[in-house]
């Protein structure tokens, strides 16, 4: 009974940390997009936490974890996820809460890639469909004991494939079909850089995500007494640090500056890549995986730009490409079955198959969502809405109200007229007349 209490506390706390990562996503994306779209990306994260969470609880959880005769889709637990039978000492409610955090994270990966030009209503549909069918179905194949990839022996401890690669390539398909932001690419194929609105804000988001990742990975043990908790946590730390280090040094060499956005994404790439194997690899392997992922994210970002896919936050490179790499890396570095550690090729081939399946499913899922949106509420924002900014177009409020900043100043600061006899207009009047 004592273990049940400890596990409950551990998993509920881990679930809360994973859900707190949504704050990281919102700050990261708000900092990477332009100011006129900052409110919109935060509102999309609220959609993930509201619509997405309810959709997964009601339908998606059953598809993912329900019983299944054919290894393809769950057919029980609809509307009653609490009825799941667990083989561990943990209340079903704690398990369901933790899984909701994972589902919500998968949607948020898509949010950044389609930022600044997607209809808000279309994103509501996107969040629902990802949590109802896209994420749960491939998650069933990988994480349900009845799933066909699970039966083959695929290893994905905390979701490099099930969450990150899936979210990244769903995002890739949607960003491709949505088209780039106006002015992002020139007729000769070259790209124009849209400067992020607030790098310190994005950095704060990255720090929150890094913090939450310890629960994302170590929390997946679902067991407070698990002896691998500490090794999972240190592997998570080392991979993130190595990814950021590699990206930092490469940008200094390649571009001549220490690029903050690439360093941020290098850290996140290391965390993404180690997520699949954090429980199965050594600390040196975690560092190697982190270094490689930090290099991948830069070249993947350049590749995505070269094919004119507009991804404002780098979600495809961070989550898609490094989710695939991290999944395959398990087959290379796994201490008991890895190709590099034991010479055994079997697990490597299974991981390669699993990663390929997830990529294809993500691309198909993204295309399906885009088609549904086009035929219902529309997919892309109008040219006027995009030009004005989605904050005002869809939410009626800017992220930073500059007019209020002036009009809220103490009245004593506006006594210039009385002391000099020179008439001046108010800040609001000047804006209107200009």
Image (cartoon, rainbow, N blue to C red):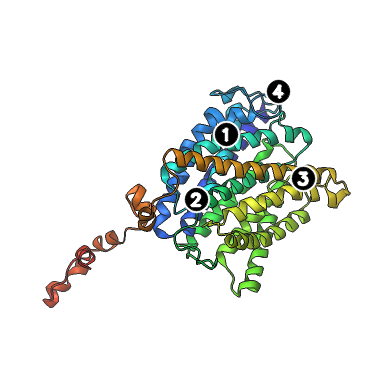
Report helix, strand or loop for mark 1.
helix
Q: Which residue is mark 4?
A: 69
Residue 105 lies, with reference to residue 414, above or below; the image says above
Give how far across and how far down residue 432 sits, in percent: 21, 63
Mark 2 or 4, which is nearer the eye?
A: 2
Q: Is residue 434 left or right of residue 348?
A: left
**Residue 122 visible:** yes
- Looking at the rendered image, the quarter that the C terminus falls into is bottom left
Mark 3 or 4, which is nearer the eye?
A: 4
Which of 76 and 406 lies nearest the eye of the viewer? 76
First-in-chain label (3 vs 1): 1
Q: Label 2, label 1: how many angstroms apart (C-alpha)?
A: 21 Å
Q: Is residue 296 left or right of residue 25?
A: right
Give how far across and how far down residue 182 sits, in percent: 44, 60
First-in-chain label (2 vs 4): 4
The disc placed on residue 178 is 2
Q: Residue furthest bottom?
A: 420
Mark 2 or 1, which is nearer the eye?
A: 2
The disc placed on residue 280 is 3
Q: Which residue is mark 1?
A: 133
Mark 3 or 1, which is nearer the eye?
A: 1
Q: Residue at x 52, y 49 (%)?
A: 177
Q: Label 3, label 4: how many angstroms apart (C-alpha)?
A: 29 Å
Mark 3 or 2, which is nearer the eye?
A: 2
- Looking at the rendered image, the quarter that the N terminus falls into is top right
First-in-chain label (4 vs 1): 4
First-in-chain label (3 vs 2): 2
Report helix, strand or loop for mark 3.
loop
Give how far across and how far down residue 215 sits, in percent: 62, 44
């Amino acid at each position: 009974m004592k273990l049940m209490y400890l596990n409950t506390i551990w998993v509920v706390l881990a679930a809360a940390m994973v859900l707190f990562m949504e704050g990281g996503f919102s700050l990261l994306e708000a900092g990477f997009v332009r100011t006129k779209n900052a409110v919109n990306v935060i509102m999309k994260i609220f959609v993930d936490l509201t619509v997405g969470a309810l959709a997964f609880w009601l339908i998606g959880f059953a598809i993912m974890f329900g019983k299944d005769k054919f290894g393809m889709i769950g057919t029980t637990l609809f509307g009653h996820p609490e009825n799941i039978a667990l083989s561990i000492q943990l209340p079903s409610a704690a398990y369901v809460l933790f899984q909701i955090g994972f589902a919500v994270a998968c949607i948020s990966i898509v949010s950044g890639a389609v930022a600044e030009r997607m209809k808000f209503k279309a994103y509501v549909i996107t969040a629902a469909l990802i949590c109802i069918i896209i994420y749960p179905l491939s998650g069933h194949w990988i994480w349900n004991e009845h799933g066909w990839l699970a039966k083959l022996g695929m290893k994905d401890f905390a979701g490099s494939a099930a969450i990150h690669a899936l979210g990244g390539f769903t995002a890739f398909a949607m960003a491709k079909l949505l088209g780039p932001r106006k002015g992002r690419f020139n007729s000769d194929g070259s790209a124009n850089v849209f400067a992020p609105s607030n790098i310190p804000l994005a950095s704060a988001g990255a720090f929150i995500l890094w913090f939450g990742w310890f629960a994302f990975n170590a929390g997946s043990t679902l067991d407070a007494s698990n002896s691998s908790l500490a090794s999972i946590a240190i592997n998570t730390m080392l991979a993130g640090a190595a990814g950021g280090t590699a990206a930092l040094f490469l940008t200094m060499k390649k571009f001549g500056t220490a690029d903050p956005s690439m360093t941020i994404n290098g850290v996140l790439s290391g965390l993404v890549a180690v997520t699949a194997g954090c429980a199965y690899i050594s600390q040196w392997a975690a560092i190697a995986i982190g270094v490689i992922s930090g290099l991948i994210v830069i070249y993947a970002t350049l590749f995505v730009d070269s094919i004119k896919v507009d991804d404002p936050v780098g979600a495809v490179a961070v989550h898609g490409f490094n989710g695939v790499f991290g999944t395959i890396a398990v087959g290379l570095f796994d201490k008991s079955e890895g190709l590099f550690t034991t010479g055994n090729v079997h697990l490597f081939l299974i991981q390669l198959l699993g990663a390929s399946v997830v990529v294809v499913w993500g691309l198909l899922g993204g295309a399906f969502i885009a088609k549904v949106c086009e035929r219902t509420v529309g997919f892309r924002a109008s040219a006027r809405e995009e030009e004005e900014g989605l904050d005002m177009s869809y939410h009626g409020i800017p992220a930073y109200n500059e007019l209020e900043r002036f009009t809220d100043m103490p009245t004593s600061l506006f006594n210039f007229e009385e002391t000099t006899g020179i008439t001046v207009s108010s800040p609001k009047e000047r804006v209107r007349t200009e």
